[in-house]
Image (spheres, coloured by chain):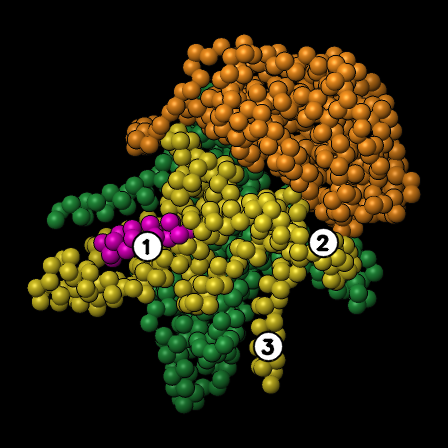
Chain colours: A orange, B yellow, C green
Amino acid sequence: MHKPIITIILICFLGCKTDKNHEKNVDLSDWSVVDAKGQNQSMNMMMWKGDPKINAYMNDFVLPKVKSQYGIDVNIVSGQGNMIVQSLMTELQANKSESEIDLVWINGETFYQLRQIDALYGPWTSVLPNTKYINFDNPFIGKDFQQDIDGYELPWGNVQMTWIYDSAKVKNPPQNKAELLDFAKAHPGQFTFDNHFTGLTFLKSLLISFAENPKELYGDFDEATYQKYSQQIWNYINQLKPYLWQEGEAFPENVPQMHQLFASGEIWFSMSNNDSEVDNKINEGLFQNTARAYVPDFGSIQNSHYLGIPKLSQHKATAMLVANFMISAQAQAHKSKPEVWGDGSILDIENLPENQKQHFQYIAKRRYAPLRSELDQNALMELHPEYMIRLAEDFRTKIINP
Amino acid sequence: MISKVLKYSFVLAVVFPIVFLLGLSLAQQWQFPEILPQEWTFQHWGNSLFKQGDILESLFLSLGLSLTLASLVSVLAFFMSKYIAYSKYRQQYMRLTLVPYILSPVVLAVTFQYYFTVANLSGNFIGVLIAQLFFALPFGIVIFNNFWNAHLKSIEQLSFTLGASAWQSLLKVILPLSKPAIVLCFFQSFLVSWFEYGLTQFIGLGKVKTLTVMVFNFINEANVFYAALACVMLILPPILLLYLNKRILILAR
Amino acid sequence: MKVYPVLIKLLFGLLIVLPLVAGLSYALSYSLGLSGLLSKGFTLDYWQKALTSQNLWVSFLYSLSIGLVSVVTSLCIAVSMALSWNKSIQQGRLSYFIFLPLCFPATVMAFLVLQWLSPSGWFSRIAFELGFICSLNDFPNVVRDFYGVGIIFCSVLLITPFFTILMSNIYRNENLLELEKLSKTLGASSRKTLRCVTLPILFKKSKMTLLLFVIFVMSSYEVPLILGRQYPQMVSVAIVQKIQKFNLNDIPLGFAMSVLYVLLVILVLVLFGKPSRKYLKPNIK
């Protein structure tokens, strides 16, 4: 019944349909072709815009550089993982020939979902000249949530989750699950985690901590293993729940909200998937300078974030040029400055040519978070996205709405 | 006496939010339990007005969008509501009109986003304009609905009897009489568009950054001071409108 | 001149009926597994899941009760203001201030409420400075709380000015002052006049508007997005979340919910809607 209606509506709308095909028959596996075709165009990039520092890095550094070097205008559009999936999915479904989006900032479950619906172009990353300096041997970079990236996404940065606390109020931050529980009991209402990526990353590291060997959880999703350990995690969270912020009846919706609560003194802990966040936020004036970052003894998850090109993009060459710039030593070094963003580089800095290595030489150390080398000791791998989807679902049904 | 105190406290309660927002937009640091910000600054205003200019850009975009929509709705609603009001099926027409009128715009947007994508209308100005029209037009028709009455119809009939053409009657008789209704409809639909967030965000894919969308982005970043600043910009035009003509605001939501 | 009616009908169909029907049929076909990239053909699974999920019904009931409570609360405030300040609302300086809150879009109002009522908010700071509370955790939790106090408070702020104006207009247009005088001349007490004359007339004339506002509040999106919490959720937020969050298999469920919501609203209108009456009467002289 609805099919004819849809058809009629489609016909009505077809009048305004204007499709341009710029890139038919262009060989994108040849960098010189990409270089020639990609310049002097404009393109759209969709990314999470929840952090002023990251926005400033893009607006004040990347955009002007690609404009002056290649004449490319990049228009940045706000949209996180699920929004990206939703938009690209609708386009595929609508049989569009051209995507509204040419470059996306993704990782983990967004990558998984986009591959599920076959929305990504690839493999394309090996064409980029700067790819040869990427440290693909590092499993934290070469694998995204246990998945092979297969050239469908390009590593852009690497981070590790840290816990943030106010050292003026917390002298000895909890180092393991038992300590956390004791701490929460002694100071009810001061600890929480958000209902989004960061909180789920926290839950994943807890899940791993219940396993005797983290390797049990690595690889593809396994229902039996999940059942075994998730039971324990919900028991633990339920013990913790009455002592969480708002008695565990509500959770901050996202990290900025949690930061805001931390900044105003409503909670004593925050978290971030970006290990240099605490320096950023103190510099911005949002956090008091007694805020510190640390990783508890049971470790935290380290992961990378990536750039992908939608299959239907008509500006693939342009997107590739921009992506190549974004993984250049210059852009990566600037990005890793704590006062800029503090994002970990995915380049193998030791093996860079001397003239490029110099970019990394004079980067000020961060002051309020542990060194990356220390964090590496406690780094856990990301789990398969299905674990996260299941944790999110169970978190909703078992904790938020039991 | 009590009534006077109540009245003054009411006035205070109404003006306070504006002062509060303004203060927040000038604050730099404001930690618990300070009642007033610890540091004041004009930097946010300077940045958004002169340096980055993105808030200013949004202001103009919003103005453009809302003014275009308001004109479109006023013209369409005028003719459509007139036809509906004098039709045999007025009740049925109005019932249908009320459905999009009271539905949640964002749910509407969710259900027809697919078609907008197919038609290349998502993520651009025209798309958002059309999407807003789908729910602002019913608004306009509802506003006009009570305006067309038997009295007005008899005046129109009279003008025909006296030999006026349809065109003359419209131009010389009906339009002058309906000026207040048109003005009301124009400003109402202006505000509907001005205040809209969910639908604009969904159909505009975040690319059509109206001022309301900006406010939400700032709130999501927990960027309180800029959010307050954008809020001030958002309420200034309606306040100006209020000053010009308070009656037009009645149906704003 | 037969072109004109056809044109109008066409416009009506295209701009009002079509989007609704189109949207509804798309949502319906998606929820039945007929469209969507991951669809595997016709299935009633999602509907079964939606209808039996406690979440959905909680969401509807929660929204409805928030709508009802907000409207009733605003109504009480509005009627008392309209009756006691009737003259100054219609003209004079106070009239400007009555209208002022109408300049605040839902987004701004919700943001303000958050800044005021959250535990680290402005009211909590005042309470702290005055010594009523010793730490911000003592401040009652009214934002993102179970009962939706924050959402209700914000909705009341948003709709009370409108109701006040509406009531004051009805009061004037229906000549209530004269009726009240008459009733008193006939020997009724002030209280009886209020109970048997003024309030019934006000209520009768504004019934439809009140109903519409219950639905408005029920469907609101921006306010619960800022002031709501993960459970229970208001309808619009729940639908959008289902369609946009992590699990792609939840999307048909979200569409089923939206179809249900639209049908519910249509049902209410068919049952109670008498569109030609005087509800939402613009104040044009």
Residue A92, percent across and down? Answer: 46, 23
Q: Is residue A124 above or below residue C274?
A: above
> Of marks 3 and 1, which one's residue comes earlier in the chain?
3
User: Residues under labels 1 and 2: Cα distance?
Assistant: 43 Å
Q: Residue at x 56, y 34 (%)?
A: A76
User: Residues under labels 3 and 1: Cα distance?
Assistant: 38 Å
Report whether B115 appears left or right of A163. left
State yes or no: residue B82 in magenta.
yes
Secondary structure beneath dot 1 equals helix
The residue wearing badge 3 is: B8
Magenta stretch secondary structure, dominant? helix
Q: Amino acid at mark 2?
A: Gln
Report whether A391 appears left or right of B8. right
Secondary structure beneath dot 2 equals strand
Q: Amino acid at mark 3?
A: Tyr
- Callouts 3 and 2 in the same chain: yes
Residue B91, percent across and down? Answer: 28, 54
Q: Tell me the quarter of the image containing the C terminus of chain A.
A: top right
Residue B100, percent across and down? Answer: 39, 47
Q: Is residue A195 above or below residue A22?
A: below
What span is colored magenta in the figure?
A: B66-85
The residue wearing badge 1 is: B74
Q: Residue at x 44, y 55 (%)?
A: B191
Q: Amino acid at mark 1?
A: Ser
